[in-house]
């Protein structure tokens, strides 16, 4: 199948990638860029495990074609705490640290998507109520935690980011 060249700015780095028309943003980021933090749970827009931030908006990247994302700024979970190998200091983003400190992570599969949703929420609303947090994370499913610790983590992250 013929490929088209698209340009994405992923976690601050410009990338030119040859993509097939059927490739999703999730597939492209995971397979072409080898950034595997974003997960494929359902592949149908229902679980939120693939959540990324595209031009400031939370997106289920399994439903977005790579070609639709041409020219956008994409942030994945890897962009929140760049690795020391990349010259960063290795400190986690406050949302990531809050998830660890509150024990909100069990198997971890849903967590990259949860954290991207939480970051998007807190960027828009730095003082969320519990109901705001529930609503902000309504598109993200977790099979392990029962959500209480996740909500606590997001409220704790809000405190840390003030
Ligand atoms: S994998 Fe995209 S919403 Fe489930
Ligand atoms: S921690 Fe296992 S699915 Fe959420």
Image (cartoon, grey):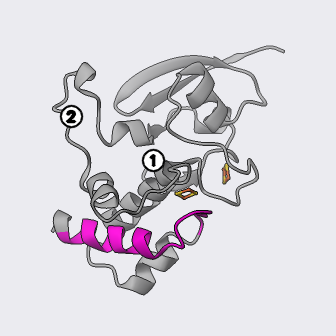
> Magenta segment range?
139-159
Does the segment drawn in magenta span residue 141?
yes
In the image, 129 versus 104, the foreground residue is: 104
* 88 displayed left or right of 60: left
In the displayed structure, 115 sits above or below 156; it is: above
Q: Which residue is mark 2?
A: 90
In the image, residue 73 lies at what x, y percent?
Answer: 44, 38
Q: Which residue is mark 1?
A: 55
Which corner quadrant of the image does residue 87 belong to? top left
* 134 displayed left or right of 101: right
Does the segment drawn in magenta span residue 33?
no
**Residue appearing at x 26%, y 70% in the figure:** 156
Q: Residues within 10 Å of mark 2 (few under 14, many from 20)?
A: few
**Residue appearing at x 73%, y 16% in the figure:** 3
How many numbered dots are placed on residues in this image? Answer: 2
In the image, residue 50 lies at what x, y percent?
Answer: 59, 47
């Amino acid at each position: 199948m013929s490929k088209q060249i698209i340009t994405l700015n992923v976690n601050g780095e410009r990338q030119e990638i040859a993509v097939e028309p059927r490739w999703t943003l999730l597939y492209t980021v995971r397979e072409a860029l080898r950034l595997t933090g974003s997960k494929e749970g359902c592949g149908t827009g229902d679980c939120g495990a693939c959540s990324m931030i595209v031009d400031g908006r939370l997106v289920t990247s399994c439903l977005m074609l790579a070609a639709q994302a041409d020219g956008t700024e994409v942030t994945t979970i890897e962009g929140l705490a760049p690795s020391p190998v990349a010259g960063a200091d290795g400190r986690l983003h406050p949302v990531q640290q809050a998830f660890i400190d509150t024990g909100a992570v069990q198997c971890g599969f849903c967590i990259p998507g949860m954290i991207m949703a939480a970051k998007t929420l807190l960027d828009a609303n730095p003082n969320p109520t519990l109901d705001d947090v529930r609503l902000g994370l309504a598109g993200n499913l977790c099979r392990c935690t029962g959500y209480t610790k996740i909500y606590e983590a997001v409220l704790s992250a809000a405190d840390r980011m003030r």
